[in-house]
Image: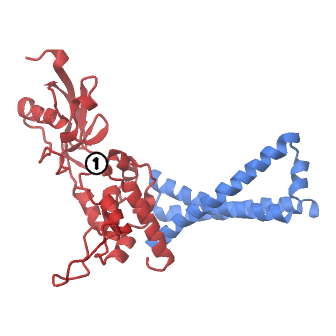
Amino acid sequence: MSARAETLLWLAQRISAMVLAVVVAVHIGTIIYAVQGGLSAQEIIGRVQGNTGWLAFYGVFVAAVAVHGPIGLRTILREMTPVPARLIDVAAAAFAVLLAWTGWQAAYGLYGFGGA
Amino acid sequence: MADMASMLDVSVWRGADEGRFVSYPVPRRENQTVLDVVTYVQRRLDATLAYRFSCRVGMCGSCAMTVNGVARWTCRTHVGRVAKDGRLRIAPLRNMPVIKDLSVDMAGFFAKAARAKGAFRPTADRTADFAVIAPDSPRRRRADAAIECIGCGVCYASCDVVTWNPDYLGPAALNRAWTLVNDERDGGNRERLAAVAGDAGCHACHSHQSCMERCPKHLNPTESIAGLKRATVLAALTGKL
């Protein structure tokens, strides 16, 4: 991988970290607020179902996770394992696709729950 | 003959990468440095001990060793400061191949300074007038903050990222590159930033700050590396990397 590509990966991880700092705080804050009166699947679905704001929020959340996690995993694998660098790049990219696909599917699934 | 209360229990690494610690009794003296202790062992107890030193006053940076687990200049380390219980464990610097006993092969360490484009690339010839650089200009100040490195290898030996990734350029080479990035007379920054970017360069730094903690000159290579991270990102975004 070129020096430019590696530099941009580093930048992407920093920017995604900044995004995560905000969305994770909102996410956890909402959980703490929401469980005050007991937590049920019905209540969660009632809040996010059909709500475009929450869909957008979790869309951004998943995107930031899919960028941030695999880059960090790539660094850990490069430093801590003898796995060839090329293979690690492929594995990290596959992990990013997996996170994005499953994450967005979950967010969209809750948004459209019950055929809304 | 000194009694045991005035004796130091000194363990010294003997061998190369494979070896063992050997114990030597060394008389405790006032104002004694760790280098004095090593010299005593070599001159009085075992003449085959290999170690490296030159100036003895903290100018040359050649006597760095691992003293009780910490990389230090032995000439500037008083025994009283590091051996409260009268025990000293002296090993070669980490992250460099051991040649013999306390002498390490620093060729790879210096090669990385060259790989990081640590040589000045002039933009003017000898006929040009002096470059006038204001002492309080931001770039001059940044270069000043990092310029006093004498290449002793203490930061390099203290860096865990070097241990994990032997290809990593390390704090000293990157710190040197940062001084040149801020040198207005230098014309080699495009190649230099390309050389210091990426997984074996500044972006591999985890900001543990061991280099800053251990630098005998109280420099802050971590800050220099952070500067390189910013400079390389800017270069990458503007198509200059």
> Dividing the picture into quarters, in which one does residue A112 lie?
bottom right
Task: Estimate the x, y position of residue B18 in percent, counting from the top left.
Answer: 25, 40
Q: Which chain, by letter, is blue?
A: A
Q: Residues within 10 Å of mark 1 (few under 14, many from 20)?
A: many
Of all chains, the one bearing label 1 is: B
Q: Is residue B235 left or right of residue B151?
A: right
Could you say which is closer to the camera, residue A30 or residue B94? A30
Q: Is residue B182 left or right of residue A57?
A: left
Task: Estimate the x, y position of residue B221 in percent, counting from the top left.
Answer: 36, 55
Q: Does residue B81 appear anywhere in the picture?
A: yes
Could you say which is closer to the camera, residue B84 or residue A7? B84
Could you say which is closer to the camera, residue A34 or residue A92? A34
The residue that appears at 36% across and 49% down in the rendered structure is B212
Secondary structure category for the residue under label 1: helix
| Residue pointed to by mark 1 | B154
As displayed, is residue B103 above or below residue B44?
below
> Of all residues shown, which one is farthest toward the bottom?
B127
Task: Estimate the x, y position of residue B84 in percent, counting from the top left.
Answer: 28, 25
The tint of chain B in the picture is red
The residue that appears at 88% across and 55% down in the rendered structure is A47
As displayed, is residue B85 above or below residue B124?
above
Tell how many labels.
1
